Amino acid sequence: MVLVVKQHRCTHSASCVCIKGHLSEDALFLVFRHMNWNPRLIAILSCVCKWFDEVAKQVLWKEFCHARAPKMMLDLHSGGSHIVDGNWKALGKLLIYCNGCTKGGLFNNIHVPGHFVFRTRFSRTAGKSFLPLPCKSDVLYVSDPCEHLDQGEEGDLGFFRGIFKSFATSRVKRMLIEKRARFHPKELCPYCKAKLWNMFQENMIPRSASARLGAYDDSVEYFVCLNGHVIGISTLLPLSDSEEAADE
């Protein structure tokens, strides 16, 4: 039985160690399935040569995403949508990596180092709270906020990330184009290196986003890239206040 249909060939020079031969794609598939698609080992394998990198991009990261968030992956590809195809590595990173921020970057003078997270819940229902009213028919998955507490004058920060289904045909993208929104002049998506739009700058973040995150009003800011990846930040309310806001 063929487990992996597409075959990749090493494009390295004659000095590449791969000329001695490497494992078949079927063998790699079975090895990494046994290791439950360990993302750290997939990343290490990608560094060996172009052949391994291609196998990782097209096969291993795809399997990792389906294993980590099966219902979400099924939905993202339903209805003929293939927005994730070719971007499995970026999506895999988005599932497990909080990008944080650097001084002078997307979120001005805030500096919080990026880090891997063990597990994050992504919710389609939560995503509705981040969509402007004319775009409620769009599908957006958003993560629970990754909390970074006691950040000096900035207070308690919550970083979140997400992905749109079929962003190329979404109402959000259409609205951004109609508004003639400008891309960020220098920063790119940390997951796929595509250009970014600032949703806060375009006044396209509803107040419901603050309530969903348990954050101060007007403290939520997020960017969306051309591939539909979302990167955002908010200033979280103290726990007692956020609980009262949720009750309301």
Image: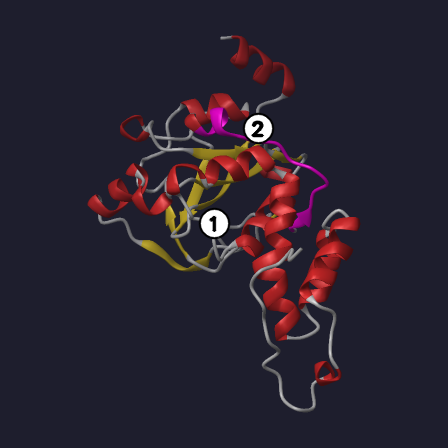
Q: Which numbered disc, 2 or 1, marks the residue closer to the eye? A: 1
Identity of the residue drawn at 61% across and 74% down: 50
Disc 2 element:
loop
Image-based side of 65 in relation to 119, left or right: left
**Marks 2 and 1, Cα distance to the nearest angstrom?**
31 Å
Is residue 121 one of those drawn in magenta?
yes
Image-based side of 160 in relation to 239, left or right: left
Residue 62 place in picture, x, y as percent: 59, 51
Residue flagged by tag 2: what amino acid is it?
A: Leu
Report crowding for label 1: few under 14, some 14 to 19, many 20 or more residues within 10 A (C-alpha). Answer: many
Q: Is residue 180 above or below residue 240?
A: below
Residue flagged by tag 1: what amino acid is it?
A: Val
State yes or no: discs 2 and 1 in contact (Cβ < 8 Å).
no
Q: Which label sits on residue 84?
A: 1
The mark that comes first in sequence, 2 or 1, is 1
Q: Which residues are magenta?
A: 114-127
Outermost residue, bottom side: 14
Residue 8 place in picture, x, y as percent: 58, 71
Residue at the spot of label 2: 236
